[in-house]
Image: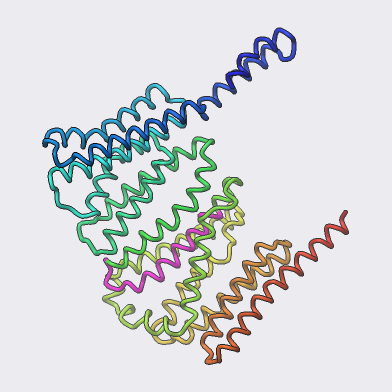
Amino acid sequence: MSETRKHLPEWVKEGIITEEQEQKLTAWLDARQSRFPGMMFWLSLLAGLLVGLGTLLIIAHNWDNLPHSTKLILSLMPAVIGACLMLFAAFRRRDSLLWMELGSLLQFIGIGASIALISQVYHVNGSMESYLFAWLLVFTPTQILFSGRFSLLLYLILATWFVCAAGFNGHSDVHTLQVLWMLGCIMHSVRNLHINKDAVSFLKVFSWIFPPCFALGYGTLAFKASHPELLFLDYAGLMGLMVVAGEWLKTYNSCYSINGMRFYGRLGLLVIFSLFSYRFFWEKVVHEQLFSRDAFYRLWLLWIGIFQLALIGVYGIYGFVKQKNTAALQVEPWFAIVFGIAFFLFGKFMPLAGMISTNILMLMVGVSYLQKGVKGKSLLWLNYGLVWLAVLLICRFSDVNQSYLLRGLFFIGIGILLFGVNVYAMRQRGKEETHVG
């Protein structure tokens, strides 16, 4: 880029480009240089990392022989260095995306390293949950102010680790407010990145990482409830909301036409419907104690599931009536509502009816997407409908007591059927394209 910049005045003098074009090229080179630094920067960064690693090895080897005050100073150095880099990026390299990202990420790592070293120096007893909580709490203001991309991913991973480690262990010292401010910090950062149009690619990646992290943390609700089996109903509502959110993102901005919200929501509903297509889940999971009058008012997991399904219904009706939004017409969220109704109608006295209704729902989902794929000539929706039907057939075939030979032939037949339908659809599309041409 520096060579190109040197030739610009000569090109203007010889009439190759105009002065206006020279100004535009100079502005473009400046912006590109601030975003993508040269080889010297990366070599300097690599040299700094090597020097830092060598220094850490020397300090670690002589750690036990160092005085207490020296240990304390060395323990604070990672956080101080990270803060200095963050301040340098904020005040001197504000327009450089790479400096801002590296500054926030190094400060995040430095804070975690300093907390770990200080606890080791003073022999502070604690659990992994308390360490993660302190780490996230200290860095939260920086993440809210600067909304770094790499630091946001690390923040999300550590927050998920904290919620799962504390929730699945049944720790009573973890409060809902702690989870809410972590989630609020993540959503605030996503909002700031959404305003910055250069972050679209990152948000696409984030849409594939956030749903499984949130679903993992969501599962910890069962360890605080008296009837954790109600989490199946809550997950059905959550997956339906994910599909709705993914369709809304697609309608809101075509850049998010392929997002993880839709994929994980549909995958989750497929798993839940597959489980409840067996009579065992209706007999063992949905038991009579869930429907007693006293339990009905005390089960907050139950009310969470009802609230989620109600949100799906309100959004669907509003989107269809007021805005004519096609995202409101997706099949799975509405069938999640039907599953919730069947949960209450058939769960107590008619488990067989619940099983049959779930199988009918899976059949309707598969047929509806098969019809959508054929009508729209889309291999994606055609295969998606075939997947639902194939899973339904496999679930029902597993109930039949047959030999392994017949089961193997059955699976081979399903695979050949899927392959044959795709080949036929591709040939039909090729004939139509040839006819049009």
In magenta stretch: residue 238: yes
Count of marks placed on residues: 0
Image check: 268 left or right of 157? right
Residue 157 image point, x, y percent: 37, 51
In magenta stretch: residue 18: no
Residue 224 vs 285, above or below: the answer is above
Q: Nearer the viewer, residue 64 or 247?
A: 64
Image point (43%, 30%), residue name = 99
Query: Quadrant of the rendered structure where residue 415 is?
Result: bottom right
Q: Nearer the viewer, residue 277 or 27?
A: 27
Image check: 413 left or right of 221? right
Query: Quadrant of the rendered structure where residue 299 is?
Result: bottom left
Residue 423 image point, x, y percent: 74, 68
Please identify the quadrant where the N terminus is shown.
Answer: top right
Q: Which residues are magenta?
A: 224-247
Residue 98 visible to the viewer: yes
Image point (33%, 39%), residue name = 108
Image check: 382 left or right of 78? right
Residue 100 visible to the viewer: no
**Most distant residue in the top direction:** 13
Residue 279 vs 313, above or below: the answer is below
Q: Nearer the viewer, residue 251 or 57?
A: 57
Residue 72 image point, x, y percent: 16, 36
